[in-house]
Image: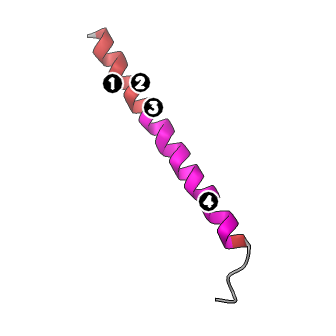
Amino acid sequence: MAIRGPVNPNKQPVELNRTSLYLGLLLVFVLGILFSSYFFN
């Protein structure tokens, strides 16, 4: 428990934010493609 430093808590939220950001971008990209195909048809 003593090995736990201030680096881990700071690193985890950044990774979570990065993954959520990438997931959000991917979701928006897929939704945009779906909506564009829906409107073109």
Kindly identify which residue carries mark 3. Answer: 28
Along the viewing direction, whichever of 1 and 34 lies nearer the viewer: 1
Please report the residue visible at 45 percent of the width from the left and 38 percent of the height from the top.
Answer: 26
Choose mark 4 or mark 1, whichever is in front: 4
Compared with 16, 34 (above or below) is: above
Kindly identify which residue carries mark 4. Answer: 13
Compared with 3, 11 (above or below) is: above
Residue 35: percent from left, percent from top: 35, 20
Report helix, strand or loop for mark 4.
helix
Question: Quarter holding the N terminus?
Answer: bottom right
Mark 1: which amino acid?
Answer: Leu
Mark 2: which amino acid?
Answer: Gly
| Disc 1: CA contacts within 10 A as few (<14), some (14-19) or many (>=20) | few
The quarter of the picture where residue 30 lies is: top left
Report helix, strand or loop for mark 2.
helix
Q: Is residue 10 magenta?
A: yes
What span is in magenta?
8-27
The CA distance from mark 1 to mark 2 is: 5 Å
Q: Say whether residue 12 is left or right of residue 5.
A: left
Mark 3: which amino acid?
Answer: Val
Residue 22: percent from left, percent from top: 52, 44
Q: Which mark is residue 34?
A: 1
The CA distance from mark 3 to mark 1 is: 10 Å
Choose mark 3 or mark 4, whichever is in front: 4
* Lower sequence index among marks 4 and 2: 4
Kindly identify which residue carries mark 2. Answer: 32
The CA distance from mark 3 to mark 2 is: 6 Å
Dot 3 and dot 4 residues touching (CB under 8 Å):
no
Please report the residue visible at 48 percent of the width from the left and 40 percent of the height from the top.
Answer: 24
Q: Which mark is residue 23?
A: none
